[in-house]
Image (cartoon, helix red, strand yellow):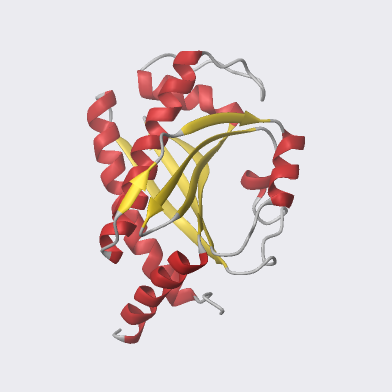
Amino acid sequence: MNYKGDMKEDILKELINIYVGQAASLLSEIVDNKIELRVPVIKILDNEYGLESGEYPHLLKGALMVSSMRFENELKGRAELIFPANHIKELISLCMGEEIEEVHELAEFTDADLDIVKEIGNIVLNAVIGGLGNFLQMKIDYSMPEVKVFDNIQVEELWDRKNKRNMLILFVTFKIGGTEIDGALIINFTLDSMKELMSKIEEIESNL
């Protein structure tokens, strides 16, 4: 089934921007600094095609830090919050109110760095997946988030192996202290969960 369409993507984008806004408010309270999160672009993938590396360089080029979690029960799948590794130190410094230092693409990350990224991922992923679960009135159980760093070769290999069906790609802009950092949130649903979500979106679309 073809789930693509500008209206469907617009409806999802409006919903998900509400959820990331809630995550931003919670993060702002934690770090005592205003954080803005928005999703300017969302893509629905329902087959193995339609995503070119040249069109979306943040996803497919360079080293990445990925915070991921699985969700199951009535709504099932896997969600991954992705940022370029060379911007993670900058993001951490901004969140901690520390001076930003120039870092190389594969900078060393401390356990404290990974814990901060894990907490950011936990808040953002829970807000988005939890929001979708409430929207669909479906129960969700979450795994604990995991954080990993992948070099550019590993990124390409992982992406080539990834199932690109039943996927949402959300391009995320993280703004704090006047600095913007771009990343992405990838959600892979099971077939049944994707059908449930898109059926609800189509219901809203038909009533507009």
Q: Position of residue 198 (x, y in %)?
A: 42, 73
Q: Residue furthest bottom?
A: 206
Q: Position of residue 166 (x, y in %)?
A: 54, 64
53 or 160: which is nearer to us? 160
Question: Is residue 14 toward the left or the right of residue 180 in the image?
Answer: left
Question: Residue 50, relative to residue 98: is it above or below?
Answer: below
Residue 10 in view in this figure:
yes
Question: Residue 43, relative to residue 140: is it above or below?
Answer: below
- Rendered residue at 74%/51% (across/down): 160
Residue 20 in view in this figure:
no
Q: Residue furthest front?
A: 73
193 or 68: which is nearer to us? 193
Question: Residue 65, relative to residue 204: is it above or below?
Answer: above
Question: Is residue 25 toward the left or the right of residue 63 in the image?
Answer: left
Q: Position of residue 35 (x, y in %)?
A: 32, 35
- Rendered residue at 63%/46% (across/down): 59
**Split into 4 quadrants, where in the image is the C terminus?**
bottom left
**Split into 4 quadrants, where in the image is the N terminus?**
bottom right
**To which quarter of the image does residue 205 belong?**
bottom left
Q: How many marks?
A: 0
- Rendered residue at 29%/33% (across/down): 27
Question: Is residue 14 toward the left or the right of residue 30 in the image?
Answer: right
- Rendered residue at 48%/47% (across/down): 79
Q: Position of residue 3 (x, y in %)?
A: 52, 75
